[in-house]
Image (spheres, rainbow, N blue to C red):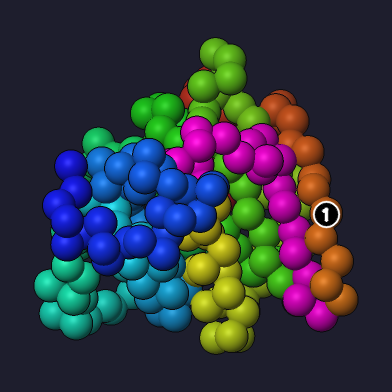
Amino acid sequence: MQNPTQNARYSRQTILPSIGEAGQKKLANSSVWLVGEGSVLEAALIALASSGLSQILVSSVFRFDESLWKGRFADSEISFLPLDTIQIPPVSLVLVLTSVDKMRKRLNRELRGKGLPTVFGWNAGSGIGLFFSQYKNHDKKCPCFECFEILNPKAFNEGVPEVLRFLGAAGASETLLWLITGKTEIENQVWIQSLDSGQSFYHPVSASFKCPAFLLEKGATVTP
């Protein structure tokens, strides 16, 4: 429950019909696990913490100065979770923005077993890509992130800082939208946004028998 000071702090959000007081209360009772690195991680963290989330767990793939963030935001408890041994925390949603392919795969495979709502974000060509899954559609726990990746390996690339900051903000925006409404247009489909041409499109993702996560779950051998 928010106090009068918090109500005043987020008054610009609550006047928006898409958020309102009910939406702000949902944010105040929600938690997110954020995984990434560098400018994409910082952009997402600022956007999430500024919204009034109750708790944000942060895992950085590379070195990250934790001291700069603790106590910086009045209402969001920011704590840090090492990635050396993944222990999936009990959060409302997971936001994965790392560009490290091995870590994305590792997280996807762990999250499939937990059934946690997850947003994946990455650099795609001259723009960004986002994908959402709850891993609960049927017993196969697919489509998942690797269902798309295995069939579209060229859809991923390194991004410049400006694009990475945009990706962080876009991933955070999609996260907040789902926390407030419980809905998203990118469930089980990829949204690609080109920053050069301004074009955007949706790419439906279906469960793939080639999905490495699914094959591993069935005991098959998968090459790295």
Q: Position of residue 127 (x, y in %)?
A: 72, 72
Query: Is residue 34 magenta-colored?
Result: no
Q: Foreground residue, 124 or 52?
A: 52
In the image, the segment drawn in magenta is: 176-196
Q: Quadrant of residue 184?
A: top right
Q: Residue at x 66, y 43 (%)?
A: 186
Which residue is at the far top?
139
- How many labels, in total? 1
Image coords of residue 193 (percent x, y): 75, 64
Residue positioned 42% across, 27% down in the render: 115
**Whether residue 209 can be seen here:** yes
Does 58 sit left or right of 117 as displayed?
Answer: left
132 sits to left or right of 11: right
Q: Is residue 158 left or right of residue 210?
A: left
Residue 26, how many percent across, how many down? 34, 40
Q: Badge 1 local density, few (<14 within 10 Å), some, or many (20+)?
A: few
Q: Position of residue 36 (x, y in %)?
A: 41, 65
Question: Circle 1 — which element?
Answer: strand
Q: Is residue 183 above or below residue 174?
A: above
Residue at 59 percent across and 85 percent down: it is 162
Q: Is residue 207 above or below residue 129?
A: above
Look at mark 1 in the image and give the residue it sits on.
201
Instruction: Please check the rendered image and state whether residue 195 is part of the magenta-colored stretch, yes or no.
Output: yes
Tell me what residue is drawn at x 21 percent, y 70 percent.
73
Q: Residue furthest bottom?
A: 161
* Residue type pointed to by label 1: Phe
The answer to whether residue 37 of the structure is visible from this angle is no
The quarter of the image holding the N terminus is top left
